[in-house]
Amino acid sequence: MEVSYNLRFQRFSFTNKSVVDKEGEIIIYEKGFRLKGKGASDKGELISFSDLKEFYFKADKVFFVTFNKEKYILSDASGMFDSLLKDLYKARNSFLIDALFMKSGKLKAEFDASFERVSKFSKPISKGSAKIKIYERSMVIVPSNQDAFCINFNFVNFYEFEEMDYLVKIVLDDGQIINISHLGEDFEIFQDKLNEVLGGLYQSVVNDVLRECFGYFDLGTLLKLAYIIKGGKSASKKEILKIDKELYQAVEDFIFDNPDFKEKMNFLMAKADENNIRFGIAKDFTQTQGFIRWIMIAIPENNIVVFSILPRWENSSNNALEKRKDESFFYKIIMEKGDVVEKTKDKIREIEEALINLNFSKDPLYKDKRDLKYSPFQYAIRKMPFLRILRKSFVGLASAEDSNKWIEESSEILEKSKI
């Protein structure tokens, strides 16, 4: 993609001082654009979409602010403004879909529709017409003149089809609601496709994960577990015990295949109740028969949620796919003020969203921005709200190989994190 438009562009410094005011053109590329003044000697300024902190339009002007706090205004595109806007958002949304890891699995279908996005407090977030792209594990909504956003199916709490109004209502775990309408003759096709994909999620968890790991349990038991751990989400000890006590023991044995790791986790689990001891198991898409295993423990009394991702595990004769290293990541539940018990669920959800959306990559969850300068997660850590909050709440890492030293590291973190 490479298109250009004649216009006027202005640049202001972070002190709002006018630095550039030119007549010229914008040349739009796949991952950014160039602002170029008139004349062959003007080479212009190349701006990447990854440099943009804010991007919006009002009336017949486009505004954007970079992470360096420079502000730009594009104007005077004459009768081509709508076309300019469409091409800018087309390129920007293509970038956002990749940079924020919105695509999950293979593309299954596309539809033209309208959407309305509402917060858990019933406040409107955005609405408009869009292209709806359904993937195996996510739905990407791509408006023509707004930023694209994603619904990860693993965080869909509830959905329904209101056939009288030809409306699809999707409710997420965080209370957010997305209504999809104006599907026209495609309403039934959309309904079938969404049912097929979401139904396939549970089937995949059962067939590709649970039957491989716990195949000696009946299908009904495995389906109940699949419902709460889809996509690698964590299930509490209490939830698993409620399904089947023997199943809980099997899950615990599967997670604690190493006595040293179990000793370390026992130190933390002794401080938590059954609601706050949580286990996750997911398909590892980097391995043919691989699984991801992880544990999360919330300790509100110490203002801490901690998680550990075990070394990648393969259902074969060779279980050691990487050198054993027990790393545990500690996060404050609240950073300023609030009720720590009420905020615990929010912190658990932040960790789950970060791990699942970023395919269980640990680096973007705690490493310094300078260490991630050339990382594919660079833009995500700037723009994903749950990831930004999670990174700010990181307080420490326990990684000692010796169990006693690991417990010492953890004790220090727990003590300094108390409110």
Image (tube, rainbow, N blue to C red):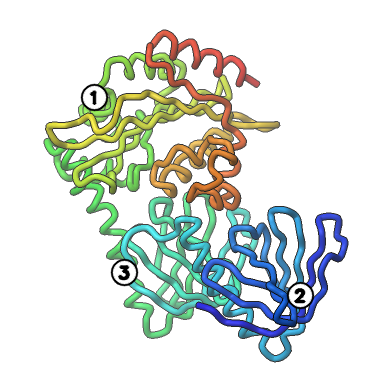
Q: Is residue 349 left or right of residue 416?
A: left
State the image coordinates of residue 331 (x, y, percent, origin top left): 54, 30
State the image coordinates of residue 411 (x, y, percent, origin top left): 52, 13
Q: Which residue is mark 2?
A: 9
With respect to residue 230, does 33 lie above or below?
Answer: below
Q: The residue under label 1 is which amino acid type?
A: Asp
From where the camera sits, is residue 264 visible? yes
First in sequence: mark 1 vs mark 2: 2
First in sequence: mark 2 vs mark 3: 2
Q: Is residue 151 left or right of residue 385?
A: left
**Could you tell me how far apart the alpha carbons at marks 3 and 1 are, in whole angstroms?**
37 Å
First in sequence: mark 3 vs mark 1: 3
Labelled disc at residue 108: 3
With respect to residue 150, does 235 lie above or below?
Answer: above
**Could you tell me how far apart the alpha carbons at marks 2 and 3 are, in whole angstroms?**
40 Å
Q: The residue under label 2 is which amino acid type?
A: Phe
Mark 2: which secondary structure? strand
- The residue at 33%/67% (across/down) is 107
| Residue depth check, mark 2 versus mark 3: number of the one nearer the observer | 2
